[in-house]
Amino acid sequence: MHDEFTHEPRVAYFSMEIALHNEIATYSGGLGVLAGDTIRTAADLELPMVALTLVSHYGYFRQEINADGRQIEHPHNWDPAQWAEPLTARVALTIEGRTVWVGGWLYVLEGHMNGRQPVILLDTDFGDNHPDDRAISYHLYGGDEAYRFKQELVLGVGGMRLLRALDFKLRQYHMNEGHSALLSLELLRRYAYPAEDLRPGESPYDLPRVRELCCFTTHTPVEAGHDRFSYELVDSIMGPLVDKATLKQLAGQDSLNMTRLALNLSEYVNGVAKRHAEVSRTMFPGYRVHAVTNGVHPFTWAGDSFRELFNTHFPGWCHEPELLLRADCCIPDQLILNAHRQCKQQLLEKVSMLTSVRLDPDKLTLGFARRMTAYKRPDLLFSDLARLKALARRWPLQVVLAGKAHPQDESGKQLIELLHRHMHELADDIAIAYLPDYGLDIARTMVGGVDVWLNTPLRPFEASGTSGMKAAINGVPNLSVLDGWWVEGCIEGITGWAVGDSEKVDNGDDAVSLYDKLENKVMPLFYAEDRAGWVAVMKGAIARNAAVFNSHRMMRRYATEAYIR
Ligand SMILES: *Cc1c(COP(=O)(O)O)cnc(C)c1O
């Protein structure tokens, strides 16, 4: 069944989450969507890969929002048997001294250009396993530290052993974030020299060989954000893969730092935007950190009307998104406006279906949707309600919001409540909808359906951000803080607008800058009698952003720089 994929060498791509489909609960947010776009692009490019993630039987969670604006979490059960084939192979891991059997499911990602890529969904939910161990593959990002470490063991080491049992031939191992870094220890163990070949005191490990095989993409611009486990916890869970001195030398003396481990055992390391790579170099002096700015899968994220428009004007655009460079001069304005109106209509219908809010197709509509957490500052737009109301009196304004907070992120959940309080306060002046249960489908409808995509993170916490790239494909300009990809993507007044100053350390003036930009640039242009100025920015977003910030460009770089060295 998986045999069709084992005859040629592949790149193994490990990620704690992968967004394959709206109903497949193996993702939570940006990291998973990036992983999904990576595999979708590999299918188009026919770049042989095999992706691994956990099956996550109960998913991340389904979000309900109650009358008080409080997030309620429900399990997102899904049935892998409806989507994937069970694999017969099982491999053994030792966890807390018990044998844990790891198996999996084969999901075949079928690209829209007929490419196929195998995705293995790792599973421990077998009758032979202890109930605690069966649960390891239940909840994405759930549980405590020990649960998390066991999941990372199943992903990294279990995944490696299963690939071998299935007879995959592998040329590279790509760790998408540090969660899978334990795979490098399995490689060290596998390629260790036998004791009889060693001189006394000589290390058995072939570090250069393992480094040649590994590449690592880091996504976290703050030291505190990296997974770190105490050796006490590690020792209580994981049997020895390599000797302790070697482990500490590679992963940190005080605790096992997954990022350190991945950095030390990967020949190719990259950050996900130029600014993020700079930040990472400062955080990890002595390592060579490349910059491969993220991209999004063009076909997936273009709305239906834009797919049609691009098919007519730039045949082949979704495989060669560079063709979109011509959007600024080769598509009549009216066709861009018509395509956008269709996307906006779809969003308005979705808003009516999911909420009691009714939006107006002629009003300027701002969109903001992402993980609800403090550094993303979803409340920045609402920091001066009087000014916001005054703006809306001059130029009609409406807003669509969405996003989940991690169940253990209380401040993120409070932000959702705060947004709902603002929505009620503003109800007479500005229609605001909060769409529950943000996921792939809502994202696709939102990024194309709003008029301006807003992002206001606290610098430098946004490693890249990708939703703004999805907006650009649909001719939706960004109004964003200069962090992550927007440092590269923003050409003021041409592809969108900047909020604040990229060099200033202080983020304090960002709200004022946001209101000023809306008042002086965005709103007058949107409501101008002659729409040519507005359409020019829409076209600028397509031509200068979508042509660049797509996953085809990204994957061609990974292929030529990271996978072939
Ligand atoms: C694209 C996407 C994200 C990531 O958005 P950011 O702007 O990078 O925060 C998160 N969730 C979903 C469902 C997405 O489609």
Image: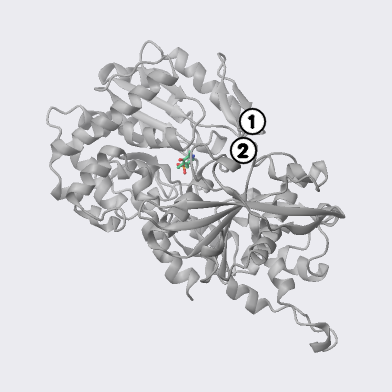
Q: Residues within 10 Å of mark 1 (few under 14, many from 20)?
A: some
Pick the front one: 4 or 198: 4
Pick the front one: 169 or 342: 169
Q: Residues within 10 Å of mark 2 (few under 14, many from 20)?
A: many
Where's residue 422, x and y in %?
Answer: 47, 18
Mark 1 is on which residue type?
Answer: Pro
Mark 2 is on which residue type?
Answer: Gly
Contact, mark 1 vs mark 2 (Cβ under 8 Å): yes
Label 2 beta carbon less than 8 Å to ligand 1:
no
Where's residue 146, x and y in %?
Answer: 78, 46
Q: Earlier in the sequence, mark 1 or mark 2?
A: 2
Where's residue 95, x and y in %?
Answer: 82, 54
Q: Residue at x 78, y 80 (%)?
A: 203
Where residue 534 is drawn, which disc sits there?
none
Where's residue 405, x and y in %?
Answer: 58, 32
Q: Residue at x 73, y 44 (%)?
A: 125
Is residue 210 visible in this depiction of the protein?
yes
Residue tagged 2: 59
- Give the distance between the C-alpha atoms of the residues marked 1 and 2, in whole angstroms: 7 Å
Where residue 75 is drawn, which disc sits there?
1
Q: How many marks?
A: 2
Q: Residue at x 44, y 27 (%)?
A: 401
